[in-house]
Amino acid sequence: MSKRTRVSKHRQKRKKASVGKIVFSIFFLLFSVIGAIGAFFAWQVYTDLRSTTDDMYEEVEAQEQHTSRQEKPLDVDKGEDPFSVLIMGVDTEGPDNMAGRSDTLMLLTVNPNTQRTSIVSIPRDTYTEIVGHGTTDKINHAYAFGGTSMTVNSVQNLFDVPVDYYVSVNMESMQQIVDAVGGINVVPPLSFTQGEYAFVEGQATHMDGAKALAYSRMRHNDPSGDYGRQHRQRQIIEGTMQSVASLDSVMNYRSILGAMSSNMRTNMAFEDMMDMFNNYRSSVSDVEQIQLSGSGTMMNGVYYEMIPDEEIARVQSHLKSELEIN
């Protein structure tokens, strides 16, 4: 082989090596840029989440601790402990206003061991002890008398179970949250019209926020009265929970956070929310709806819902089972 041929082959090898280095450098730079963008996006999501949850956070003052939680404090970090959340739909005069009465009361339990969630609706006119006020009255008056703390304590007293967390939602602004998650799918249990909206029994319906609010508000034309309305409210809550747990909602997190920050209050810390999102999402796929039921009566010209002791015992037994309380 001639000297010229050897030099030519050597140059070709160097050229191939140089091209390979250039290609590798380009891909390395590309992946580095993509990684940096991903890291920045993750940091931005984390920052937004932290800021929003800090805005929503509001501790419950003078909350009575249930004995079961004194013996074994709740820990959602491992995703093994069942927990409860009191959802309060606050009836207010407009958005960005969290004063009023708890027009909607639902006690939600999440059990990761059975991978099941239950939603217990409490009639707003339920006649019970208002803990901390020294009276027996409608349970929805507890919020007007003493806010979140008095409501939480009254619900704990009613069922003899701990309320680990609470979420209060301005019902007038619930439509913003539904819109933020991209709407929800609901199957109406009856046909009716409410304002400009029509609903057909048994027909799956995709609802935006305004339609969902109208759907949950109708009461007087429902044969089941307020119980029918509570059932439809549970459907809205269930649909919203499932949408929040979906991938589409995660991609839309900014609008969700924006809707939640001004219209919700909770005692869930940022770390608790992250633990729940990561460890308890599968429990939302199986939701059981339960209605606390009684009969209406008038006392001194005021309507109350009287709940029989056996009915309270039935719901109490279910809640203790779901929370794994002996």
Image (cartoon, grey):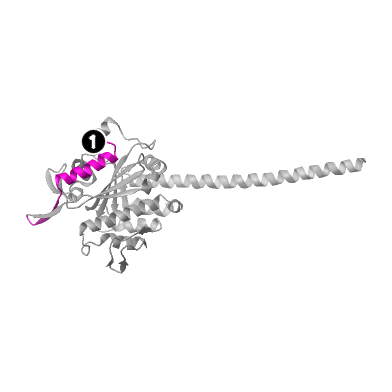
Q: Where is residue 304 in the image (x, y as percent from the top left)?
A: 13, 53
Q: Give the quadrant of residue 83.
A: top left
Q: Give the quadrant of residue 134.
A: top left
Apparent side of residue 34 relative to residue 227 in the rendered image (left or right): right
Q: Residue furthest top?
A: 71
Q: Which residue lies furthest to the right in this view?
A: 2
Apparent side of residue 92 relative to residue 279 in the rendered image (left or right): left
Q: Which residue lies furthest to the bottom in this view?
A: 196
Q: In the structure shown, which secondary structural element does the residue marked by tag 1 occupy? A: loop
- Depth check, front residue: 270 or 213: 213
Numbered-mark total: 1
Q: For residue 154, say whether it is visible.
A: no
Q: Position of residue 106 (x, y in %)?
A: 26, 49
Seen at 60% across and 44% down, the residue is 32
Q: Say if the magenta span includes residue 165.
A: no
- Depth check, front residue: 98 or 216: 216
Q: For residue 148, say whether it is visible.
A: yes
Q: Position of residue 188 (x, y in %)?
A: 31, 61
**Image quarter of the C terminus:** top left
The residue indicated by pointer 1 is 66
Apparent side of residue 34 relative to residue 46 in the rendered image (left or right): right
**Image quarter of the N terminus:** top right
Q: Give the range drawn in magenta.
A: 300-326
Seen at 20% across and 60% down, the residue is 225
